[in-house]
Image (cartoon, rainbow, N blue to C red):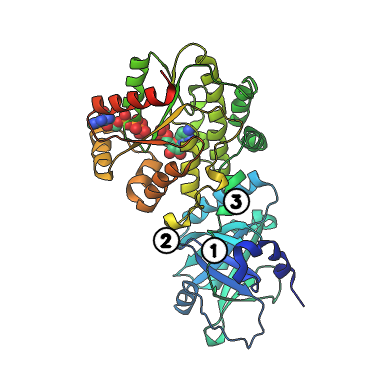
Amino acid sequence: MQSQLARACVPMAASYGRLLATDSLLAVEAADGDPLYLSCSPASSDALSRRPPPLLLPLLAAGGSAHSLTVSCPERVPAARLRAALRRALDAEEGRPLPLLSLPSRERGFLLLQPRRSPAAQERRLRPLLAPHLQHLRVCAYELGSGSRVWQCPWGEGRARWLVEKAVAAPEIHPSVPSLKGEAVFGCWKEAQGVLQECIPFIPEARGVLELWDKCPKYPQKGNVPVIVVEGLDATGKTTLTQSLKESLRAVLLKSPPACISQWRKIFDNEPTLIRRAFYALGNYIVASEIAAESTKSPVVVDRYWHSTAAYAIATEISGGLHNLPVRNHEVYQWPEDLLKPDLVVLLTLSQEERVRRLQSRGIEKTKEEAELEMNVPFREKVEELYKRMENPRCVAVDASPPREAVIENVLHLIKDHCLI
Ligand SMILES: Nc1ncnc2c1ncn2[C@@H]1O[C@H](COP(=O)(O)OP(=O)(O)OP(=O)(O)O)[C@@H](O)[C@H]1O
Ligand SMILES: Nc1ccn([C@@H]2O[C@H](COP(=O)(O)O)[C@@H](O)[C@H]2O)c(=O)n1
């Protein structure tokens, strides 16, 4: 008889065709590379494992323990916050909590590997930690059976167990791609507003952002003067360029996120992706209303806007290298239809060596994301590539390595060409 989980797999046929036969698939972010895929299927106790699971088998064979925890809370904001709280609690434990996505349920959580504690000792340690949340968690222990088979044993399900193996094949698309839209990249203001409304009971500052947003016109149009956005990684020269453009064009200089919500930025930066990205997304819509108001009077220059919000969100959510990114022309690269469009988006590009030189000479303390950009090469490559994949409007790349005056001159030429001035 076909199991319930196998039936639930059917809608995923398009993306996970070859894996339909398995009952669940765990995508584990084991390192900075591609996810590791483990399949869990019902099997009789004499079943042979043909594909022993990497990571789990060596750990269990050496006397360590492994547990997976996935959050099954139906409400997305409490679910995201519970995952973040678990991550903090598990980070404080010995061992490594590896981010985990379970398919087809799409529940997220962690695989906790503990090399120095036996399964029983680890369970004694985890029980009190997890007890308050058990109604929203699915916790599984991994046990080593005879013949080097690894079994997934869900807590609270008696003797039920699932044979864990290395998956036959990786899904054709990265497992996080289907949830980007609506969880990390928002296609309209209503989506971002919806997330922040759900945050009010937990994050009082969300109300402040929403009250400011309530006062903004909802579909503002730009005036007849040029609106120029400047994008680029940290220290590529955005501040330098936008200040000069302000003077040369006698423009108003705006910034996303806008000053009126910047006081809450730190709070939202410490929240999980769903909430953090909704904050920046709604910030763009607030900036749009500022652009509309200012562009009736003078040109407007904007330091970061939607391209930054989308590029960083996608790069953070999609692990591994460039090949894991959504394909070109994917819907996550499309400018939201209800967001005021600029006339020109300039992307400042710079070699990594020169960017580091500029970061060092500036001497400001690095943010967590700046440090990530420096250390994590695939992350940086993804952000750079994502800027280039954004569409409608696309970014126009400008080499930021020449001296300041030359960069400004080049951008002024571009503005003349694009904005008919
Ligand atoms: N064309 C240039 N040549 C040499 N140095 C430059 C040039 N443009 C900017 N710089 C210097 O590089 C450093 C970073 O520039 P800037 O602060 O403008 O970058 P940024 O993109 O706004 O950074 P962030 O996003 O982190 O705020 C500064 O010290 C600035 O003076
Ligand atoms: N429109 C924006 C602007 C910023 N972000 C996020 O903030 C980080 C960089 O901000 P800076 O003040 O250092 O320029 C950037 O890495 C994004 O995570 C955003 O999402 N959208």
Q: Mark 1 points at which residue?
A: 172
**Callout 1–callout 3 Cβ contact below 8 Å:** no
Residue at numbered disc 2: 33
Q: Does the residue labelled 2 lie within 8 Å of ligand 2?
A: no
For marks 3 and 2 on the same chain, the one whose residue lies earlier in the sequence: 2
Is residue 358 found left or right of 198 in the rendered image?
A: left
The furthest residue to the right: 1
The foreground one among 112 and 80 is 80
Q: Is residue 135 visible?
A: yes
In the rendered image, which quarter is residue 208 located in?
top right
At numbered mark 2, what does the secondary structure look like: helix, strand or loop?
loop
Name the residue nearer the viewer: 53 or 294: 294
Q: What element carries label 3?
A: helix
Quadrant of picture, ligand 2: top left
Q: Pick the residue in front: 373 or 382.
A: 382
Q: Residue 364 in the image: x percent, y percent?
A: 30, 33
Residue 75 position in % (x across, y down): 69, 47
- Amino acid type, callout 2: Gly
Residue at image position (60%, 71%) is 18
Number of numbered tags placed on the structure image: 3
